[in-house]
């Protein structure tokens, strides 16, 4: 196969990544994330109307009259399906949902509540905290693992790539106001695993090549390693993306956000293994001595 | 890496077949008890309600402190120590002791064998911590004392919750402790939890108290309102009888008034108490009070001696049934708050299953087609490994009767996408080895050997994420972490035992063929 000179573009892509990360952080700080009821508390109702009668405006109007705080109504997959979210949650009152249903039926006709989620403020705060802890813990665990398996220069590269993927994925969610719920946390954790996986495969090869070729500079050597593992990188990301696209398209509305986050994560993860992880090795001037020294110490 | 002993081939085959049979047993009826296990569907797939209840322990603490005060009074009286000015304030008991007995009281409270302030050796803690200022003592629950109290009220509450849920007769409810003040209730198949919620939301403290003749609230009376909010009444604080003495309760029709009522029967002690009270109280009105609200207050026309009675109060048949159920199941030690509720209707669950299976099939076909396009014969080997991987994964989930959720199905599909990675790594490595090595057996062997650490590394990283998710995640997300984690293990098995076995067989047979892969 023809060699592709990835290393020519290290600089330009690093600048691009830098810009994307800064932009993501700006959005995350100033616009924030669109937290769903899992993390914000409140009530979510997925409802199905009989065909003729309802549209978003009508549904929103009738919910607004019920004094439920901030209401948001969105179409959910089918034309007749909607998701309504509002601030008020009152799961202690057993008639709370029933009354909403009656009022709604009076104004827009027959409705079927397909799903109701009611999360109190205490629980949502706990879920948010355990979500953040889970992500932090997984990053820490990856750091530990790679620190045991590789030299520190490699660890730094892999971890920077991880942060890159997670921050930009969350940045995209912020820009488009996509909902962050429990399944997004699961997606982020899987992204962390995948991104690490992808980086480790290239790094294993870099280290093998460092042992083999004493006289090739790291700048060249990373490029050789990327090329040698390239067809694997492509095949695996293609099969993973095929599976994820299938979930995204056919898996129903509930899994949309989850699969989208994963798709973004796989794309950024593959990109960062090449363009974040490897340039770090180059700028830290990794050479054969780096790994030989380490091996002597062990 | 290419050599397999006959025994190993045999055991791989048997293992794969047995586990795969568990997968098949989900779809057919199997008579054998061992194989008749099924994957459990999560609430998001079969529909149902998930309720998280939290006990409000404040009233229990106050109650416990009140009874402790009585205990203290008696205890010190027996010991001839004068204590006075008992106050319950800010979750603590405050009292004064005569000057000469301060040290005495201190030692009573501090003693490891204290009767009044029990010491728990294993936790190195008394039930109460105390402070002493001059003649004044202040006691509050120690951390362990509080845990003990919470645990006992949680145990009681969970028992009552179980009785109430069982009485409603839902399908295989799941009731679990969460921490030391929460109860998780899962009700599969229930799409309208309104009734259960109203049953669990009531403490169901039933008391019988006489209505006072005076029209002003005084020391021994309290003002209570009627259930329907129509009026209020002054009620004596003295409790004639409480729900504890109830043996049975059921909804019946009163033949004279043609009204639905709840009839109850009392245990022996209750019957005696009730008989005595009603004998003395003929002509007075007896209020039937549930959770601080008067249900009704009929006049006592004659003494009720047999231990049977009726509660009337404008009931519908449904509300009488529910009240009878609450009375039979007993009172909760403390009010329960529903702090999280998730309900999925059965048709949404069905839609989710269909969508999940649809995307699994399509995802699977896409991946299989792509692998065949990329590797031809070796693609078939990888695909065979993938199929057995799926069978093993679902089989193991079935064997452990794991719960499959919608994110869990997503985890299976994701496993399909990522599982080929290991075989791809191996095949690509073999291709490289074949460039410099003419003996294809040697090339295949070193292809397997040299890719091994990378494959382990790559899978361990995903496994780490899955394990953390398993411990931190809840409900459906846990389902995802289980399929993802088990998926990694079955992937490694299918790659290293099944695919390698076939590869070895093929390579040894065709070692002289050009361009093997």
Image: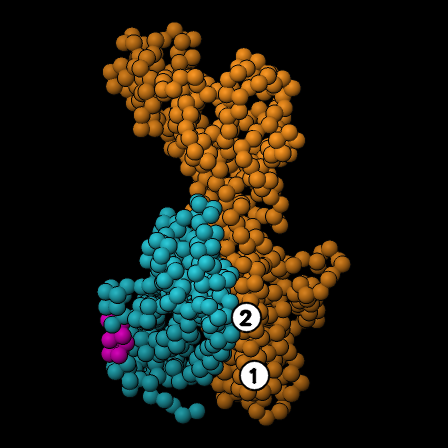
Main SS, magenta residues: helix
Image coordinates of residue A12 in percent, x first then y, are 25, 83
Q: SS for tag 1?
A: helix
Name the residue that disc number 1 marks: B369
x 53%, y 21%: residue:
B299
Q: Do labels 2 and 1 share a chain?
A: yes
Q: Which chain letter goes with mark 2?
A: B
Q: Can you tell which quarter of the image residue A273 is in?
A: bottom left
Estimate the spatial distance between the alpha carbons at disc 2 and disc 1, rounded to whole Å: 21 Å
Please state the extent of the stretch shown in magenta in the rendering.
A14-22
Q: In the picture shown, does residue B441 fall above or below A247?
A: below
Closer to the chain start, of discs 2 and 1, is 2
Would you say B147 lies left or right of B387 here?
left
The structure residue drawn at horizontal position 63% and vertical position 21%, both measured from the top left corner, is B307
Taking the image as drawn, is residue A232 in sight? no
Disc 2 target residue: B355
- Is residue A278 found left or right of A104 in the rendered image? left
Residue at left 50%, top 55%? B343
Tell me the cyan chain.
Answer: A
Up-down relation of residue B333 to residue B71 (above or below): below
Extreme front residue here?
A: B257
Relative to the observer, which residue lies in front, B97 or A145?
B97
What's the colour of chain B in the image?
A: orange
Q: Is residue A285 left or right of residue A74?
A: left
Q: Compare residues B383 and A91 and report the one nearer the observer.
A: A91
Residue at the right extreme of this rendering = B31
């Amino acid at each position: 196969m023809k060699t592709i000179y990835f290393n020519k573009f290290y600089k330009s892509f690093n600048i691009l990544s830098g810009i994307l990360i800064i932009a993501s952080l700006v959005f995350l700080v100033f616009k924030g994330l669109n937290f769903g009821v899992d993390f914000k508390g409140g009530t979510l109702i997925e409802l199905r109307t009989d065909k003729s009668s309802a549209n978003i405006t009508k549904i929103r109007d009738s919910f607004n009259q019920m004094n439920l705080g901030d209401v948001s109504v969105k179409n959910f997959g089918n034309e007749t399906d909607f998701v309504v979210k509002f601030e008020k949650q009152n799961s202690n009152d057993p008639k709370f949902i029933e009354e909403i249903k009656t009022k709604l039926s009076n104004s827009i006709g027959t409705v079927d509540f397909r799903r109701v989620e009611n999360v109190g403020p205490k629980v949502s705060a706990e879920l948010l905290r355990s979500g953040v802890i889970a992500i932090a813990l997984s990053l820490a665990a990856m750091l530990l693992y790679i620190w045991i398996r590789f030299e520190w220069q490699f660890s730094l590269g892999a971890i920077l790539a991880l942060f890159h993927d997670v921050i930009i994925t969350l940045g995209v969610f912020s820009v488009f106001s996509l909902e962050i719920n429990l399944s997004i946390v699961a997606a982020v954790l899987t992204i962390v695993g995948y991104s690490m996986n992808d980086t480790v495969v290239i790094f294993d090869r870099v280290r093998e090549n460092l042992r083999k070729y004493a006289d090739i500079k790291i700048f060249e050597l990373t490029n050789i390693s990327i090329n040698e593992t390239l067809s694997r990188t492509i095949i695996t990301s293609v099969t993973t993306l095929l599976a994820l696209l299938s979930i995204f398209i056919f898996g129903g509305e509930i899994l949309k956000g989850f699969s989208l986050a994963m798709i973004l994560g796989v794309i950024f993860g593959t990109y960062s293994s090449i363009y974040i992880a490897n340039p770090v090795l180059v700028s830290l001037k990794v050479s054969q001595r780096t790994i030989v020294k380490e091996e002597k110490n062990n | 890496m290419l050599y397999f002993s006959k025994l190993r081939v045999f055991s791989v085959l048997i293992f794969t077949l047995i586990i795969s049979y568990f997968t098949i047993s989900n779809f057919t009826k199997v008579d054998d008890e061992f194989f008749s296990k099924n994957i459990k569907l999560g609430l998001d797939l079969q529909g149902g309600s998930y309720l998280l209840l939290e006990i409000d322990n404040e009233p229990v603490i106050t109650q416990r402190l009140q009874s402790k005060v009585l205990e203290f009074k008696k205890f010190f009286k027996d010991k001839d120590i004068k204590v006075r000015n008992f106050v319950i304030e800010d979750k603590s008991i405050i009292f004064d002791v005569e000057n000469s007995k301060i040290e005495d009281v201190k030692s009573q409270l501090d003693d490891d064998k204290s009767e009044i302030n029990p010491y728990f050796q294993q936790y190195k803690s008394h039930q109460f911590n105390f402070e002493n200022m001059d003649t004044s003592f202040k006691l509050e629950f120690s951390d362990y004392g509080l845990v003990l109290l919470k645990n006992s009220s949680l145990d009681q509450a969970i028992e009552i919750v179980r009785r109430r849920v069982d009485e409603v007769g839902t399908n295989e409810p799941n009731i679990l402790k969460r921490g030391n003040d929460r109860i998780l209730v899962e009700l599969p198949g229930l799409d309208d939890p309104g009734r259960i919620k109203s049953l669990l939301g009531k403490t169901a403290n039933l008391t019988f108290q006489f209505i006072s003749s005076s029209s002003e609230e005084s020391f021994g009376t309290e003002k209570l309102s009627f259930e329907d909010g129509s009026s209020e009444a002054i009620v004596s604080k003295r409790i004639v009888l409480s729900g504890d003495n109830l043996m049975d309760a059921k909804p019946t029709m009163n033949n004279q008034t043609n009204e639905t009522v709840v009839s109850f029967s009392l245990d022996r002690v209750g019957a005696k108490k009730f008989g005595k009270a009603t004998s003395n109280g003929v002509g007075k009105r007896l209020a039937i009070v549930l959770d601080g609200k008067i249900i009704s207050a009929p006049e006592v026309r004659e003494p009720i001696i047999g231990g049977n009675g009726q509660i009337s109060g404008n009931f519908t048949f449904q509300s009488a049934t529910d009240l009878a159920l609450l009375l039979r199941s007993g009172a909760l030690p403390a009010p329960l708050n529903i702090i999280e509720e998730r309900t999925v209707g059965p048709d949404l669950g069905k839609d989710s299953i269909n969508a999940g299976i649809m995307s699994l099939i399509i995802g699977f076909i896409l991946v299989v087609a792509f692998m065949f396009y990329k590797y031809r014969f070796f693609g078939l080997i990888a695909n065979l490994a993938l199929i057995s991987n799926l069978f093993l994964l679902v089989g193991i989930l079935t064997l452990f009767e794991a719960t499959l959720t919608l994110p869990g199905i997503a985890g299976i599909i994701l496993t399909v996408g990522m599982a080929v990675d290991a075989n791809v790594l191996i095949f690509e490595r073999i291709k490289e080895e074949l460039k410099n090595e003419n003996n294809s057996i040697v090339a295949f062997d070193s292809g397997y050997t040299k890719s091994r650490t990378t494959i382990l590394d790559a899978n361990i990283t995903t496994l780490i994420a899955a394990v953390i998710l398993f411990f931190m995640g809840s409900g459906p997300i846990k389902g995802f972490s289980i399929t993802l984690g088990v998926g990694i293990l079955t992937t490694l098995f299918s790659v290293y035992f099944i695919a390698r076995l076939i590869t070895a067989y093929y390579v040894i047979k065709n070692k002289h063929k050009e361009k093997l892969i």
